[in-house]
Amino acid sequence: MSTTLKSIKRLLQEMDSGELALPEIQRDFVWNRKNVLLLFDSLYRGLPIGYMLVWKAKQFVTEKNIKSKPRKRQNIENFYGYLLDGQQRLSSIQRVRDGDENFPLMFSLRPDNESKHDENRFSYSSRSKINDPWFVPVPEVISGQISPMEILKKLEREAKDYDERRDANQVFASITKLNNILDCNIGIIEFEDDDYRIATDLFIRFNSTGKKLKITDLVSSELALTVPDIVSQGINRLCTKNSPAFSFSSTYLIQCLVAVHTGKLNLKNPQEVWKGSNVREIKNSWKRTEKGIGRAIEFLTGTVKWNSSAWLPSINSIIPLVYLLSLDKFNVEERILARNWLLKANIHQIFSGSAHTELDRILRNISREPTIDKLLNITKRDIGKIRPYHFETRRTSGAQMSLFISMLRNNNAKDWCKDTPLDGSVIGHNAELQVHHFFPKALLKLKGYNYDKINTFANYVIIDKGCNLGISDEEPSKYIKEHKISKKDLRDQCIPLDKTLWSVSRYEDFLEERRKLLAKNANAFLKG
């Protein structure tokens, strides 16, 4: 190994040209907006951001495709190497430089920031900041689209509180400092070898020591090493195959593959997951996994009636179903049993704690007897009846709402005003589905009810946006009559038909009765 220094600008140029690339073993870009902001804050202050690790390979290996078309490598002599550590940092700078809309970083020019140790120098774009001449977009500065002198002239023209004699020197110094960020030198550890296994081992050791990688990322790296191309050409392709309705992360799909291939989900030792398996066996397991995912999507849309993965309270909860569906299709009876199990499992939150531990236990059991009946039997103690207290939540998403949506759609429920189905198939002006407060918020506020009492699941119904906008802030007893809402429509939404409960004076009684009715109807539905 050897060390060298390179400027950020030079490293970005090498990434742009393809001289520096990401090997397939690398994980996806995972940094959030705060991570990126803090990185730029550190660079601006001149704080160290750590070394990067580059493998100066003597051979080409499968790359992680960032662009739509993979590069065709020809001459190894013109290639610098593969970035083994530093992807998140370098990709963050690259995204900001290129004006990625997910990271619209802004820089404050106000001189008083210097006296506060540069507090709040960096922030993300907002309407007020776009219109404030004291804020400049970071991409325009670091890419040279705007010069310090142009910024000063703009301040002089547009900022009423700008004083040239007082502020010019400090602003010029700050913007020059920002402009020079890409000239910062980064320490590079260079590793030169022709053995992909050694490079992968180094990547895993280097990253896992600092706990920068998740276990699934390490498993992914081992998979990329064992079966080249499977991540880039198989798993990454399936991530977006059913987009936008059903998109999956590569990490999640690798968990599904591990489950299908091994019949368990023990990820504690990443190097042991694929040990003893040859390329053909893993590829066959991947084909089964693809089949299981496809059948799971068909099951979710056709039987559970969820038209997107957004309705999945816990994406981990379908891994046992993916495993079973990778072996065989569900018949009509099995589909209903699987639907009921899925909805109950999410209501009872059996995957909310140590999800991998519970999944591993379930998979080890059903791998010996791969049937829905076995799945129900080993989890029956954890997924009992639905109770009224399950609906004592304020959330408009999650397991309760996902169960409610499935119930509505399986009952062919209709919108209260337009008589159109609530299955998400209707599009157009004001056709999107919304949560409507059965007792209007304004009415309850007027009567002195607090936020928690107003925003509670027992006060929610699902109608389309147009209907929601058209219903007034009157008592339910009045707008139900005005809009001629039928008893069936009310029953579908689990609304008590006792009209005396539709008066705001009995709001608390209504909530209690509706929770009972929601639980009663849910249990009837989940009996199949």
Image (tube, rainbow, N blue to C red):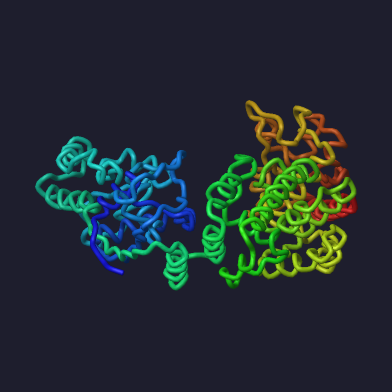
Residue 110: percent from left, percent from top: 23, 51
- Write the residue at 31% across / 56% down: 40
Number of labels in the image equals: 0
| Residue 223, position as x, y percentages in the image | 56, 60
Residue found at x 17% / y 43%: 148
3 and 99: which is toward the camera: 3
Q: Position of residue 269 (x, y in %)?
A: 58, 72
> Foreground residue, 68 or 88?
68
Q: Is residue 472 above or below residue 173?
A: above
Say whether residue 97 is left or right of residue 461. left
State whether residue 350 appears in this view. yes
- From the viewer's side, name the closer residue of 195 and 65: 195
**Residue in view at x 44 percent, y 65 percent:** 203
In the rendered view, does 35 fall on the left or right side of 143?
Answer: right
Q: Is residue 18 above or below residue 215?
A: above
Location of residue 70 by image quarter: top left
